[in-house]
Image (cartoon, rainbow, N blue to C red):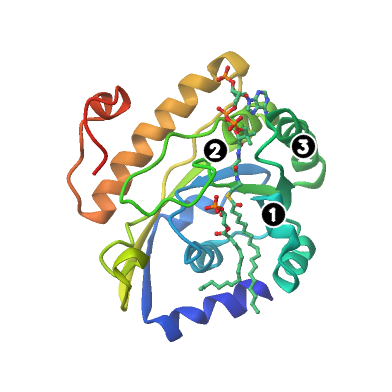
Amino acid sequence: IIANIVKTFKYIYGLRFEVQGLENFEVEGPCVIVSNHQSILDMMGLMEILPDDCVQIGKKELLYTGPVGLIMYLGGVIFINRKSTSNAKTVMSGVAQTMLDENVKVWVYPEGTRNGNGDLLPFKKGAFHLAVQAQANLFTVLYSSFTSFYNPAKKLFISGKIRVEVLQPIETKGLTAEDVADLTERCYCTMRETFFRLSGTAREPLASRHNGLLPDP
Ligand SMILES: CCCCCCCC/C=C\CCCCCCCC(=O)SCCNC(=O)CCNC(=O)[C@H](O)C(C)(C)COP(=O)(O)OP(=O)(O)OC[C@H]1O[C@@H](n2cnc3c(N)ncnc32)[C@H](O)[C@@H]1OP(=O)(O)O
Ligand SMILES: CCCCCCCCCCCCCC(=O)OC[C@@H](O)COP(=O)(O)O
């Protein structure tokens, strides 16, 4: 019900979604889906391709937003306290078991916060721990940059097109906690490349950005 309501908002805002690779989602069983998170507009992009039986990880503060919090609660959103790593990790390790028991998919924004500056923030590791703990497939989804049509700082919000790509799943069978850092890094590189390709922006050298050798754009 929520998805169908939110999916109509694109007509009001004049947004078009061009989705590629949706057939990759046609796999039964639990999985973890990670995607980039630029703004609240992502709720439209999320509902556009949301598979059945999929819940999201959200920050606890959203639970206290009145009707929206209630809708999210009823929709099965898993709330975590981002300020407490140990608390968040406890919640997330329970999620791995629930995923398997109840056959659900979990959608995580691994940047952990909204980021609309035309690049990806470094990833948090929770989503990747979750995939490894559940030995479930990991899907990556990318939404092209909104900056050309949506920029709150410049008071810009016009109609526009969002390109979406669902990439091939990554298997985590046989991986252990030791492989999580590597898995995270691999996903980050692929997702960043895909993000720039979809957005039509030039790719900046990753290593120099990471070392802080280049200033932020
Ligand atoms: C009428 C219409 C109405 C319409 C209404 C519409 C309603 C819509 C309804 C429904 C849509 C709902 C949509 C919801 C959207 C919500 C969006 C958000 O809220 S985004 C923010 C929250 N999301 C996250 O933060 C991501 C998840 N975060 C994580 O996974 C983090 O990793 C976290 C919190 C678990 C820890 O974060 P750390 O900041 O401490 O950083 P780290 O580097 O990841 O972890 C620190 C150490 O802990 C280990 N660690 C992390 N998780 C672990 C685990 N599970 N097990 C073991 N170790 C773990 C890591 O390996 C790392 O250790 P080493 O540096 O490697 O040594
Ligand atoms: C305008 C089209 C969408 C219409 C939906 C209206 C209902 C509101 C839905 C609430 C979902 C909120 C999702 C969201 O984007 O939360 C913020 C967190 O991710 C990150 O928090 P922050 O960047 O760290 O503050």
Q: Residue at x 48, y 25 (%)?
A: 183
Foreground disc of the pair 1, 3: 1
> Would you name the residue on which mark 1 appears?
61
Residue 180 shows in the view: yes
**Pointers 1 and 3 in contact (CB under 8 A)?**
no
So how many labels did they put on this image?
Answer: 3
Tell me which residue sits at (66%, 37%) in the image.
83
Q: Residues within 10 Å of mark 3 (few under 14, many from 20)?
A: some
Residue 138, which numbered label? 2
Q: Residues within 10 Å of mark 2 (few under 14, many from 20)?
A: many
The residue beneath circle 3 is: 91
Name the foreground residue: 191 vs 206. 206
Q: Amino acid at mark 1?
A: Glu
Q: Position of residue 120 (x, y in %)?
A: 37, 42
Which type of secondary structure does the marked residue at label 2 adopt?
strand
Front: mark 2 or 1: 1
* Placement of the N terminus among the 4 image quadrants: bottom right
Using the rendered view, name the quadrant where residue 31 is placed. Answer: top right
- 74 vs 167: above or below: below
Label located before the other in sequence (1 or 3): 1
Distance from Cα at disc 2 to Cα at disc 3: 19 Å
> The C terminus appears in which quarter of the rendering?
top left
